[in-house]
Image (tube, helix red, strand yellow):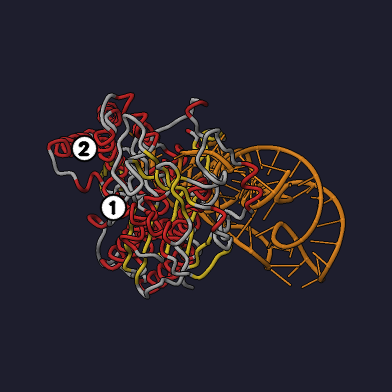
RNA sequence: GGCGGUAUAGCCAAGUGGUAAGGCAGAGGACUGCAAAUCCUUUACCCCCAGUUCGAAUCUGGGUGCCGCCUCCA
């Protein structure tokens, strides 16, 4: 089975067919860099990172673009409050974004365009929209003319009347229709601005994505993703702008993907509710792997609930995965040898699981089901380790390859600390393990337990096996 | 009011016509000096009502609960 994606344009699962065979153009809405990003923002970053990795794993040449919004009202207000320029604010929080995103194992995009570095492209996009008769200038502002765009509302499945009922028009506004939205905003005193054919001003929110996606990916792109709340108005507006600008008759985007909301203790996250959690804070409390595990444990379109319990459960799940990998590594060092282990049968079982994994990922990247398969692999490895004194080289090669492959997509197992560390501390740990082994030999269990407890207090866990004692770091 | 999502074991969560994956937690057992890890055993009338069907958690209709969007919040 090949990849099927749920397309919000049609509200159906559709077979994924890229515009150019073998290539995928993928635009993902990035953060407005006025503050640390929060744990709700982290969801699309993580889940679409996994989709991107899966596409690459399947052999596609993916161009992944994720913007930084570095000019808008929030940026301006925050910069004013901090007493710095908008540019300084952007610089700071782009760096913070990268720190948190890296910690969460999110691959860097191929291109990370910033709105303020694409003002000429934005202006020319607006000019084309005006030239095509879908926008108008009004006192230094430029608005998209909703009435000229019959398709408006096709992504969010709303008709114009219903949308108008919810819209409001402020007194003194310069729009013709309440739903018309700004492409360009005339300069206000003390705010950053750029020269344009309509006087000094700055871009509206939606236009940057249209201008930048077309610059880097073309007028017709394969995949565009973001949170459900962006479906309206942001993506609806983007689509209208892009298609009005290109005037090619081709859709702006072939597959629209939206992730479900993340709730905090069953409530929407909001500063007013006092339940606002930044990714930075979450990373202080929970291991990055557990946060990833949590995000991938449900389907990306379902809502998920961020609670201490769910994160602890995720941590325990990660622990099981990591134990398997470290048990495997330890056995590879101590139990490799002659064996009548049925390698061919084992390979066949792994292949079957591999097929199940692919099937899950191809089904609208169902990571929850895929993780179920990963645990089946873990079980297969664990029972094989249990049932065989010694195992052939191939067992270890095959098992390690399987875990590595799945983890290269999901990123929930991570590095083996004990394996990768060869510093003074690990040498000391080895010494203590040696001392404990001698204490145990002479039945000095008091000393033995003392060593184990003191290491435990430092986050080092010892496990005794018939082949000796292994150690690992707690998450 | 308009649009949409969702309801599966103590908790998290797949499955979407043929009789319930996986994880966490719990209980009992094996192993261990004791642990830890691992393994074995064990826990579901799939929100309610009606209908379609040989057969429904899965489809249809109705109801109820929860959630989101329609306010430049992922």
Q: Quadrant of residue A243?
A: bottom left
Q: Are marks 1 and 2 on the same chain?
A: yes
A238 or A274, which lies in front? A238
| Left-right relation of A436 to A249 | left
Residue A292 horizontal/vertical position (percent): 40, 46
Residue A276 horizontal/vertical position (percent): 45, 30
Q: Is any atom of residue A413 visible in this view?
A: yes
Residue A52 horizontal/vertical position (percent): 37, 59
Q: Residue at x 42, y 67 (%)?
A: A354
Placement of B1 over or under A396, stated as above or below:
above
Q: Quadrant of residue A395?
A: bottom left
Q: Residue at x 25, y 66 (%)?
A: A393
Q: Is any atom of residue A356 visible in this view?
A: no
* Residue A433's disc number: 2
User: Counting other residues with Cα less than 10 Å from the Cα at mark 1, is it few (<14), some (14-19), or many (20 or more)?
Assistant: some
Q: Give the SS element for disc 2.
A: helix
Q: Residue at x 23, y 44 (%)?
A: A418
A10 or A423, which lies in front? A10
| Left-right relation of A10 to A129 | right
Residue A179 horizontal/vertical position (percent): 56, 46
* Residue extending furthest toward the left: A424
A46 or B21, which lies in front? A46
- Circle nearer the N terminus (1, 2): 1
Mark 1–mark 2 distance (CA, rounded to whole Å):
64 Å
Say which chain tag 2 marks.
A
Q: Give the SS element for disc 1.
A: helix
Q: Quadrant of the C terminus of chain A?
A: top left
Pointer 1: what residue? Answer: A120
Label 1 with label 2: CB-CB less than 8 Å? no
């Amino acid at each position: 089975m090949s990849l099927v994606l749920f397309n919000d344009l049609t509200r159906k699962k559709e077979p994924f067919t890229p515009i150019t065979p073998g290539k995928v153009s993928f635009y993902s809405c990035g953060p407005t860099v006025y503050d640390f990003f929060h744990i709700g923002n982290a969801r699309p970053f993580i889940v679409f990172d996994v989709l991107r990795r899966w596409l690459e794993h399947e052999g596609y040449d993916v161009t992944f673009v994720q913007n930084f919004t570095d000019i808008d009202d929030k940026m301006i207000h925050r910069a004013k409050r901090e007493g710095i320029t908008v540019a300084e604010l952007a610089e700071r929080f782009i760096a913070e974004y990268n720190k948190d995103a890296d910690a969460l194992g999110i691959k860097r995009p191929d291109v990370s365009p910033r709105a303020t570095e694409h003002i000429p492209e934005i202006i020319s996009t607006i000019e084309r929209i005006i030239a095509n008769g879908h926008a108008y200038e009004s006192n230094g502002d430029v608005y998209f003319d909703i009435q000229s765009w019959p398709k408006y509302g096709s992504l969010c499945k709303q008709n114009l009347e219903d949308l108008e009922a919810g819209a409001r028009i402020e007194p003194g506004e310069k729009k013709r229709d309440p739903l018309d939205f700004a492409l360009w905003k005339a300069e206000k005193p003390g705010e950053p601005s750029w020269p344009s054919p309509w006087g000094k001003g700055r871009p509206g929110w939606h236009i940057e994505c249209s201008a930048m996606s077309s610059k880097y990916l073309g007028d017709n792109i394969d995949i565009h993703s973001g949170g459900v709340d962006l479906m309206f108005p942001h993506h609806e507006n983007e689509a209208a702008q892009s298609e009005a600008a290109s005037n090619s008759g081709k859709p702006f985007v072939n597959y629209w993907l939206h992730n479900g909301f993340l709730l905090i203790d069953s409530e929407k996250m909001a500063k007013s509710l006092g339940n606002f959690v930044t990714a930075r804070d979450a990373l202080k409390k929970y291991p990055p792997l557990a946060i990833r595990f949590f995000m991938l444990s449900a389907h990306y379109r379902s809502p998920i609930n961020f609670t201490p319990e769910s994160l602890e459960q995720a941590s325990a799940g990660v622990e099981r995965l990591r134990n398997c990998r470290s048990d495997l590594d330890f056995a590879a060092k101590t139990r490799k040898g002659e064996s009548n282990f049925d390698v061919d049968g084992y390979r066949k079982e792994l292949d079957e699981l591999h097929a199940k994994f692919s099937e899950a990922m191809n089904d609208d990247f169902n990571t929850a089901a895929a993780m179920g398969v990963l645990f089946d692999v873990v079980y297969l490895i664990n029972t094989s380790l249990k049932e065989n004194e010694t195992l052939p080289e191939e067992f270890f090669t095959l098992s390690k390859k399987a875990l590595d492959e799945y983890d290269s997509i999901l990123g929930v197992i991570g590095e083996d600390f004990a394996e990768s560390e060869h510093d003074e501390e690990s040498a000391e740990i080895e010494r203590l393990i040696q001392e404990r082994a001698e204490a145990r030999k002479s039945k000095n269990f008091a000393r033995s337990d003392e060593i184990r407890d003191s290491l435990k207090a430092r986050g080092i866990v010892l496990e005794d096996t018939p082949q000796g004692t292994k150690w690992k770091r707690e998450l």
